[in-house]
Image (cartoon, rainbow, N blue to C red):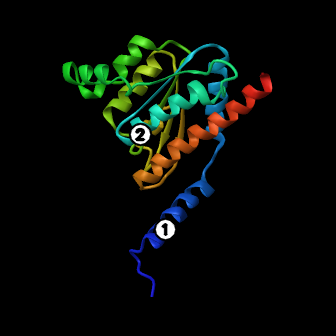
Amino acid sequence: MTDPMSPLVVFAAYRQRLQAVLDAADLAPVAELAEALRTCWAEGRSVYLCGNGGSAGNAVHLANDFVYGAAGGRRPGLRAHALAANTAVLTCLANDTDYSQVFSLQLSVFAAPGDILIVLSGSGNSPNILKAIETGAALGMRTFGVLGFSGGRAKAMLDTPIHFPVDDMQISEDLQLMVGHMAMQWLSLQSAGEG
């Protein structure tokens, strides 16, 4: 009899949940993000990414991929910035204002119309994510988000939500990276073809 708590059983169940979400996914919004990133890159505009916890780590990871990986060293990459990367700014804003403003206040300083905001959120309900979307919209940015669970309030606020309805934070975070990597690989192919 197979132990239901055996690592292999647990891993197989995780793989099945992830695969089921991928099989049901609509990738059209991911293609829309990739095209928007390509336009942003061609016009020399900036991309800002934000998230909390593991999603903040994913934002830093994907900013790196867009800065270097998309161009593969053939030419300068995208101007991509992870808003959780500067701990001095993040802790200053959290301490001196309110944690709900740690991303929106940075956007109000750095972002410009036509730039892109990508929010990464499991719930889609974090106050700092919602304020970032509001600020991005007010600044004339294009707003995208990779969301899990129900999509939360963010889903209706974004120009383009990329929503995976899965009630599992780790799978939600896996999908954030997958979306970013899909876009990055497509951009890299475009860059190679233009080089």
Q: Is residue 126 visible?
A: yes
Image spot of residue 51 (x, y percent): 40, 34
Say what secondary structure mark 2 lies in: helix
The quarter of the image holding the C terminus is top right
Mark 2 and mark 1: Cα distance apart in space: 23 Å
Q: Quadrant of residue 127?
A: top left
In the picture of the structure, the residue carrying the numbered disc 1 is: 13
Residue at the limit of the structure toward the front, as seen here: 73
Q: Residue furthest left?
A: 95
Residue to which mark 2 is pinned: 55
In front of the other: 195 or 120 = 195
Name the mark on residue 187: none
| Marked residue nearer the N-terminal end (2 or 1) | 1
Q: Position of residue 140 (x, y in %)?
A: 51, 16
Residue type indicated by callout 2: Ser
Label 1 crowd bin: few (<14), some (14–19), many (20+), radius 10 Å: few
The location of residue 104, given as percent across then percent down, is 36, 21
